[in-house]
């Protein structure tokens, strides 16, 4: 007897596999290998005993004389499941010539399942297990979205929409761009972590349109050789089921179950022959509506009633969904329409360039921002500067006015501003980024520059999701101190910049030299990024 755990989020399935069932279980083990671990200290949510299956010896002959029930129907015929349904006390059996599934009538009070399998059981069992996990996660409050996805570093971008919207086309197009890798095929599981949304990928059997396959010569050749030699005779609207290992091998990536931070949601609408147009969704109500539209609940499937042994009540699910709404501003949401040849970086930055310049006071952030704008003008591009701290400057002016004193243009009472910032964040951690996002939505410029990013936890994460690249400016410390003296700020404080090093930069410039040299470096950087 082999024992092994499938460990995913809040669900642990403990398999007890009989030796004679091992050969038939191998395709199932291979599909779920990224989630399988040795038996751990975690309590099992469900236990599944797996044995080999001989339908003639293991099933009462009278059962074969009863009428079969349609248990599941799918657009992919391989997932269709018909079975004889047998009631045995507090258990229910689903029986056909390939697989026998023995389930409790109430999985909350009895977590024991029994499977009898043959060499032809793999897809039926994989489908059964995936459905069981999803139901349990939904019951515990995990929100599931219907989406494919890309990943780069610690961030995921998911692609969502109705059938035929162009999710797979968009994903395959985006994967041709450098730096992006495959993340998930048809679902992501979401949970809130602090002020962000963490998403877990979900492995599936890709079900790909023939038209999409033909658009890539290498994929078409692979499908013709290993899936369907007659693909040339199929209609472009047909779809084919592709083995996940084959599909991921073609993409050049091994599936990983590692979660990522959700950076953006792309909502494509394929219109062949039309130029690609994109626009970011800013309205909170519209964004919330689109998120609800891509929620993927098992109760909405046509086969929901067959696994009635575990029916989510969805109370925790909807509490979690409402919780996600609070941090949805950390996620960019972009609609795409037209021919879906997609560059994710360009889409996420709204077609132009967005740069956040960071650095210690006196390092030359504002100078660098001005040089970026100067280089943009020279290139015939429009530009705008949008500050996160505009509310602080407004409050500083009000405080000085109330005190009967004047503060010079651009001067900073840094002690006052740090105190104001602390209290604004205490009242609302998203005070700055929410105000910034509203002002940003009204800016139409080829190059948008921010030069006062300091917070790594909320603001930096949000600027990334809004398509900003981060440029770090450094300089010699003695030179920085000299510049600070020359600025004449009423007070100085460095606490607000103490965590700048936690913000990951795309590029770094040394501003210790002369102005002309720095101007040239900034111009070259802008040209490269454009």
Image: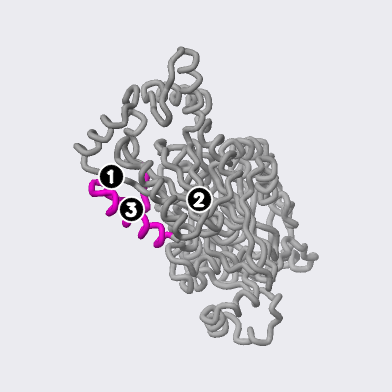
Let me know if residue 515 is in the magenta part: yes
| Secondary structure of the residue carrying numbered label 1 | strand
Residue 353 appears at what percent x and percent y? 49, 54
Q: Work out how far the residue at label 2 is from the one at label 1, CA to CA, in angstroms.
A: 24 Å
Task: Identify which residue is drawn at 57% across, 73% down.
Answer: 242
Comparing labels 1 and 3, the label whose residue is closer to the camera: 3
Q: Earlier in the sequence, mark 2 or mark 3?
A: 2
**Around disc 3, counting alpha carbons within 10 Å, would you say few (fewer than 14), some (14 to 19), or many (20 or more)?**
some
Let me know if residue 521 is in the magenta part: yes
Q: Earlier in the sequence, mark 1 or mark 3?
A: 1
| Residue 155, label in figure | none
Q: Earlier in the sequence, mark 2 or mark 1?
A: 2
Q: Work out how far the residue at label 1 is from the one at label 3, CA to CA, in angstroms.
A: 15 Å
Residue position for label 1: 474
- Decide which of 344, 366 is in the foreground and name it: 366
Q: Are marks 1 and 3 in contact (CB under 8 Å)?
A: no
**Around disc 1, counting alpha carbons within 10 Å, would you say few (fewer than 14), some (14 to 19), or many (20 or more)?**
many
| Secondary structure of the residue carrying numbered label 2 | strand
Residue position for label 3: 519
Q: Are marks 2 and 3 in contact (CB under 8 Å)?
A: no
Q: Is residue 354 left or right of residue 135?
A: left
Q: Is residue 129 left or right of residue 421?
A: right
- Decide which of 385, 80 is in the foreground and name it: 385
Task: Identify which residue is drawn at 61% across, 49% down.
Answer: 144
Which quarter shows the N terminus?
bottom left
Q: What span is in magenta?
A: 503-529
**Around disc 2, counting alpha carbons within 10 Å, would you say few (fewer than 14), some (14 to 19), or many (20 or more)?**
many
- Decide which of 463, 308 is in the foreground and name it: 463
Whether residue 14 appears in this view of the structure is no
Task: Identify which residue is drawn at 35% across, 54% down.
Answer: 522
Q: Work out how far the residue at label 2 is from the one at label 3, CA to CA, in angstroms.
A: 17 Å
| Residue 383, label in figure | 2
């Amino acid at each position: 007897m082999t024992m092994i755990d499938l460990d995913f989020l809040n669900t642990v399935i403990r398999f007890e596999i009989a030796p004679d069932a091992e050969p038939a279980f191998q395709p199932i083990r291979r599909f779920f290998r990224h989630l399988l671990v040795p038996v751990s200290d975690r309590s099992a949510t469900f236990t599944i005993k797996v044995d080999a299956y001989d339908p003639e010896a293991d099933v009462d002959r009278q059962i074969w004389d009863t009428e079969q029930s349609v248990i599941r129907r799918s657009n992919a015929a391989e997932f269709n499941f018909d079975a004889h349904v047998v009631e045995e006390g507090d258990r229910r059996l689903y029986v056909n010539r390939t697989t026998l599934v023995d389930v409790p009538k109430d999985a909350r009070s009895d977590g024991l399942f029994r499977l009898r399998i043959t060499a032809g059981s793999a897809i039926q069992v994989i489908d059964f297990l995936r459905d069981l996990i999803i139901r349990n996660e939904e019951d515990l409050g995990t929100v599931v979205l219907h989406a494919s996805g890309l990943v780069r570093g610690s961030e995921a971008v998911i692609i969502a929409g109705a059938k035929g919207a162009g999710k797979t086309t968009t994903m395959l197009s985006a994967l041709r761009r450098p730096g992006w890798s495959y993340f998930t095929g048809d679902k992501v599981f979401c949970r809130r972590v602090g002020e962000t949304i963490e998403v877990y990928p979900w492995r599936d059997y890709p079900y790909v349109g023939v038209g999409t396959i033909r658009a890539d010569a290498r994929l078409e050749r692979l499908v013709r050789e290993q899936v369907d030699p007659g693909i040339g005779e199929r209609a472009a609207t047909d779809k084919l089921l592709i083995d996940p290992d084959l599909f991921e091998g073609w993409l050049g990536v091994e599936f990983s179950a590692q979660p990522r931070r959700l950076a953006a949601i792309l909502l494509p609408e394929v219109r062949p022959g039309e130029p690609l147009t994109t626009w970011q969704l800013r309205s909170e109500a519209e964004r919330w509506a689109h998120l609800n539209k891509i929620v993927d609940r098992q109760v909405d499937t046509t086969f929901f009633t067959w696994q009635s042994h575990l029916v989510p009540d969805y109370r925790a699910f909807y509490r979690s969904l409402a919780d996600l709404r609070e941090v949805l501003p950390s996620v960019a949401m972009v609609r795409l329409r037209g021919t879906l040849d997609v560059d994710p970086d360009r889409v996420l930055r709204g077609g132009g360039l967005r740069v956040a310049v960071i650095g210690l006071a006196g390092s030359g952030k504002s100078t660098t921002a001005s040089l970026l704008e100067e280089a943009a003008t020279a290139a015939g591009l429009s530009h705008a500067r949008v500050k996160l701290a505009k509310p602080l400057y407004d409050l500083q002016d009000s405080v000085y006015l109330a005190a009967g004193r004047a503060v010079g243009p651009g001067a900073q009472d840094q002690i006052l501003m740090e105190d104001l910032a602390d209290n604004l964040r205490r009242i609302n951690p998203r005070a700055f980024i929410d105000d910034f996002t509203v002002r940003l939505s009204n800016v139409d410029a080829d190059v948008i520059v921010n030069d006062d990013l300091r917070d790594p936890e909320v603001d930096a994460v949000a600027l990334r999701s809004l398509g900003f690249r981060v440029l770090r400016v450094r300089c010699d410390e003695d030179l920085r101190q000299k510049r600070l003296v020359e600025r004449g700020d009423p007070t100085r404080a460095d606490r607000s910049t103490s965590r700048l090093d936690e913000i990951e930069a795309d590029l770094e410039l040394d501003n210790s030299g002369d102005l002309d040299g720095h101007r040239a470096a900034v111009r070259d950087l802008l040209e490269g990024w454009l």
